[in-house]
Amino acid sequence: MGSMRLLVVALLCAFAMHAGFSVSYAQLTPTFYRETCPNLFPIVFGVIFDASFTDPRIGASLMRLHFHDCFVQGCDGSVLLNNTDTIESEQDALPNINSIRGLDVVNDIKTAVENSCPDTVSCADILAIAAEIASVLGGGPGWPVPLGRRDSLTANRTLANQNLPAPFFNLTQLKASFAVQGLNTLDLVTLSGGHTFGRARCSTFINRLYNFSNTGNPDPTLNTTYLEVLRARCPQNATGDNLTNLDLSTPDQFDNRYYSNLLQLNGLLQSDQELFSTPGADTIPIVNSFSSNQNTFFSNFRVSMIKMGNIGVLTGDEGEIRLQCNFVNGDSFGLASVASKDAKQKLVAQSK
């Protein structure tokens, strides 16, 4: 418990530093809520910290939510929107369906924030803050999160299917996917380091184990010892879809072991191993650098996360501040004006 208290104190000090940070990024600034919601970071931290006791995957899941939000029509909270008569949810896009997690925790954060600072903080900003706190709780870097995003009124499932990089992408496809977002090769290698924690389903990499590129053989860039471990975890023609650690060495810790794994041909996803195993690739020196120096990785991760967080943001009078993250304001199923969950459930029942 003593070490836990020290962590909390350190994080609260970091929140204080955020509040005093004056640098702005585009139209966003880390001080955006300094007057209107001064306790924002401790509130978000408290919910995620509590959730992490029962769900060690939650940090990776929240960071992934932010990534999957920003790569589809910008960092606007669109990934959080549920299906309605007018919205096709991005949650049902192929890269997201039965895959994205943490939506309940985001809703818990939003409820806590609304109780303290009503109609003030966007769901898009909550995702950005949650990603930074997830990194810190995992032992990774923190950064001054630029804030002031507003929430979208729409979602785009088609764009989610097109823009989110697939786990079987080769390096050329990965670079193209990131370039569409204004992110370069360094950003690609850096942000891929987010796979230093979290899990992946067998279905996302099983092609590497038995029939890579329709050859009838495993992926030659996969360590043979690791191959047998993964085959035991993901048997051919199995009916289940087991979860496997993205980082086989420190699966719940945010560190640079992801890159060391690539050097040993122990990258789980094809899209991971491509960064090191593509012959002559300009990504190889970056992987080597991050593998040998965690501080270098952390420094670059801060920069790339801030850069990604600026993609396609809505500011000023664009969009809205959603009162409930899964629905736009005024949606009859959002029930944003109803205070209690019981009242919300009763109103939904009456509307059927």
Image: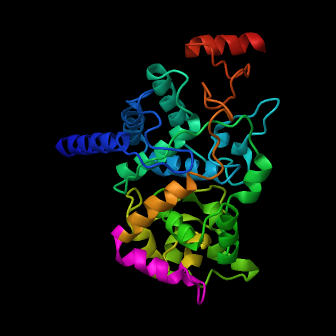
> In this view of the protein, which residue sits in the foreground, 10 or 195?
10
Height in image: 75 above or below 351?
Answer: below
352 lies left or right of 281: right
Quadrant of the rendered image containing residue 316: top right
Question: Quadrant of the image for the N terminus?
Answer: top left
Outermost residue toward the left? 2
Give the x, y percent position of residue 236: 65, 68
Evaluate whether residue 243 shows in this view.
Answer: no
Point out residue 265 in the picture as x, y percentages from the top left corner. 50, 80
Is residue 180 visible in the rendered image? The answer is: yes
Give coordinates of residue 109: x percent, y percent. 48, 31
Residue at horizontal 36 percent and vertical 39 percent from the top: 19
In x, y percent, where is residue 81?
Answer: 68, 36
Taking the magenta stretch, the answer to whether it contains residue 271 is no
Q: Quadrant of residue 295?
A: bottom left
Q: Nearer the viewer, residue 272 or 70?
A: 70
Q: Could you tell whether 207 is left or right of 39 in the image?
A: right
To which quarter of the image does residue 208 belong?
bottom right
Magenta region, residue range: 276-295
Question: Residue at 56% of width from left, 77% of height from top?
Answer: 275
Residue at the image position 75 percent from the left and 34 percent from the top: 83
Q: Quadrant of the C terminus?
A: top right
